[in-house]
Amino acid sequence: MIAQNFEYSAPANLSEALKLLADGEAKALAGGMSLIPLMKLRLATPGQLVDIGRIAGLSYVRQDGDAIRIGATTTHYEVQSSGLLRASCPLLAETADHIGDIQVRNRGTIGGSVAHADPAADYPAALLALEARVVLVSAKAEREMPIADFFVDTFTTALEPGELIREVVVPVEDKSAGTSYRKVAQPASGFAIVGIAARVRQSGGPSGKMIAFARIGVTGLAGKPYRAINVEQALEGTAGSPADIQKAAALVADGIEANSDLHASDAYRKHLAKVYTMRALAVASSRTA
Amino acid sequence: MKISGSYTVPANRERTYQLLQDPAVLAKCMPGTDHLDRVAEDEYEMKMKMAIASIGGLFIGKIRLADQNPPESFRLLVEGTGKIGFLKGEGLLNLIGQPQSTEVMYEGDVQVGGTIASVGQRLLDTTSKMIIKKFFEKLAEAAIE
């Protein structure tokens, strides 16, 4: 199908884009990997599109002290192939490897994916495990918030009308940390039926190694991505043996109302979540130094 | 699609039942709905403006209350049609009194058709859960007002 008529503008800079978006009527277009298909099906019928994909200076990956700042229109391909991220925040680069297919990774952007807040998108699991922050801008103000506060519900974020994501901020990973993203992809769309991002740090004690730090992000399982804090707490302080990991991973879906659709029932999704949390933790642990 | 679940409303059973029968309260609790127009006894017409992700649209629909057994249970029938698809649903709501609140248990069946159903399968379950959650959150707000 062909999209309904709409006005299109491609501002050259951010302030012009924010002005066009200020009244909350226009829709921002980044890579278009979610919005354009919806428009072609006429499920989305925005009257005005503001293409932020051509704004210079909105696509970058750069280190800023102990943080790495990623511009909103940085593509998934740029994230997965960034030398800086591969070396200093490998979890995010590894997660980007798993997004869609090469065409989607070449066009789709980190800001677009995060703003769309698909409950089965890959990035949210990694960003939650990384305790990332997002910087939001509007014509009037700029604010920064933890990613956990940004994802409000299914397709619902803390973005106000007229607001854009300017950048995503992730920490420089500790050299001793081990990280991993493990996912069951839906074969047709590539979206996560369940996706688990894990970060682990060990400390050496007199009685051997111990898990000093664990972070788990979960996507695909519930209406919104979440951090499995109960798993983290169950694991921290243990030796991180396969039995410890299994015991902690068993908690990942506790108290969670799991999604259920024709691809996977809620019980199956919960089962997958436990298995993939085990796998993600096992791989992450094996990568610790 | 089968739906079921329960929510706790901070009001006693009589008051919760009464809130659920009040068109003004129902309109307030349904996302994107301003008001309900009464077309017959316990039957109302409504306009619902939905906006989830980039998907948006106006739905025109009807809502009907039936099999009322105050303050224990009633049946809720909803249907709506819009450019992007249609939905038809029916559910039984049971109210269980607790010391300080009321547990509302619902169980029903929803049929969704049109474009949204043929391409949006992956999203129907999560989205419908979110709408139901929003409804009960607003109802809880109305209960303590």
Image (tube, rainbow, N blue to C red):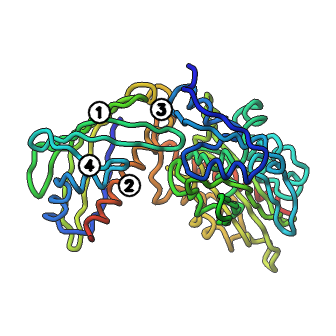
Task: Give the SS element for disc 4.
Answer: strand
Find disc 2 in the rendering and name its residue: B134
Q: Earlier in the sequence, mark 1 or mark 3?
A: 1
Label at residue B88: 1
Question: Mark 3 and mark 2: span between their CA atoms?
Answer: 21 Å
Find disc 3 in the rendering and name its residue: B121
- Residue appearing at x 54%, y 45% in the figure: A25
Task: Give the SS element for disc 1.
Answer: strand
* Residue B125 percent across, percent down from the top left: 43, 41
Circles 1 and 3 in contact, beta carbons < 8 Å: no
Find disc 4 in the rendering and name its residue: B35
Circles 4 and 1 in contact, beta carbons < 8 Å: no
In the shown orientation, is residue B18 left or right of residue A76?
A: left
Mark 1: which amino acid? Lys
Chain of the residue under label 1: B
- Residue appearing at x 59%, y 38% in the figure: A48
* Residue B82 percent across, percent down from the top left: 37, 31
Chain of the residue under label 3: B
* Residue A134 percent across, percent down from the top left: 69, 60
Q: Earlier in the sequence, mark 1 or mark 2?
A: 1
Do discs 3 and 2 share a chain?
Answer: yes
Mark 2: which amino acid? Lys
Q: Earlier in the sequence, mark 3 or mark 4?
A: 4
Classify mark 1: residues with Cα within 10 Å, few (<14), some (14-19) or many (20+).
some
